[in-house]
Image (cartoon, rainbow, N blue to C red):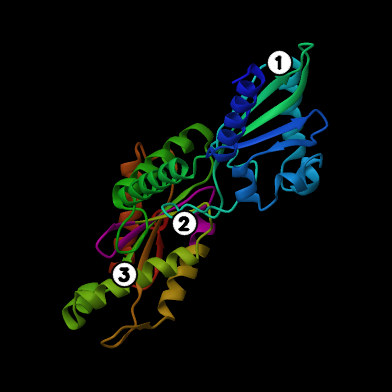
Amino acid sequence: MTLDETEAQSFHWLVDMLESVEVGLVVLDLEFRVQAWNGFMENHSGITASKIRNRVLFELFPDIPEAWLTRKVDAVALLNTRAFTSWEQRPYLFRFRNTRPITGTEDYMFQNLTISPLSGSSGQVEKICLMVYDVTDIASGKRALERANEQLAKLSMTDRLTNLLNRGTWENLVDAEFERYRRYNQATSLVMFDIDFFKKVNDSYGHLVGDEVIKHAATTAKHNLRQSDSIGRYGGEEFGIILPETDVEGARIICERIRESINDSVVQTTIAPIRYTVSVGIAQLDHAAKSYMEWMQQADEALYAAKNGGRNRVIVFDQL
């Protein structure tokens, strides 16, 4: 075999390898005209190498971020050094549909990208090579793990029955709001409320119906709050609300809205329609409270005054 035949055979093997490898290979000139387009790119784009050759990449793929890729390529050409971008920085360069059966829940192929300079005989960079790696399995697994961890974190902070904050998480927010008041002295109010005669509901209709009433109270209260407010289930049929930047009159308006909404509602359970009411206590924070626990105690005292005063009413601590 002659030298020319050996070189031709080696070139044939190289081309065959580049066509069959499970990595996208794209060669561009410095005007972003496509010079090489391997089998991986043909299969996922649906465009053959003969049709794309000498075409400007951005004309055929308008979804590609032109300004971003141009900056990357210019830096690679100027510095004559390769650059790498992971899917975590940019999920994909080419918007290819995901075809992997294992990660079929992902709409698009996640990609890592290597951008390499290709120099001519003069030593000057004449072309750029893009290598596109399908990392959908890795990305999908990591995203699923992150979602699971977020869900676990959420569950650790959430009351399972009502999906409100649980007692520990909500108390931490009360403590944080107390410290914020000490720094900035902005008006803030705390609310405690519970369901009137809830034991009668459980005794008459059972705990499942009681749970429906608790969920109804949680949902109704939450729908009457602002995004900045924080509501939690304090325990049993008792709830707490933090109303930041809200004085006692503003808190009273919000609490009356909650009380009236519940008073006017009917809970349609599988056993019987249930009507119920709530009693509400409000305490606006001032310097008399030496800790967040004292602040909570004030709201709790106002709540019990509301219950002792006939229930289905809102009482403010300062008016006791």
Mark sitting on residue 214: 3
Q: Which residues are magenta?
A: 233-252
Q: Residues within 10 Å of mark 1 (few under 14, many from 20)?
A: some
**Percent x, y of residue 137:** 44, 44
Assess whether residue 250 is covered by the magenta stretch.
yes
Q: Nearest the camera: 288 or 114?
A: 114
Q: Residue furthest front?
A: 1
Image quadrant of residue 126? top right
Q: Nearest the camera: 105 or 231?
A: 105
Q: Amino acid at mark 1?
A: Asn
For the residues carrying marks 2 and 3, which lies nearer the camera in this image? 2
Residue hosting label 1 = 80
Whether residue 75 is visible, yes or no, is: yes
Q: Please say if 299 is above or below 272.
A: above
Q: Amino acid at mark 3?
A: Ile
Mark sitting on residue 105: 2
* CA distance for labels 1 and 2: 39 Å
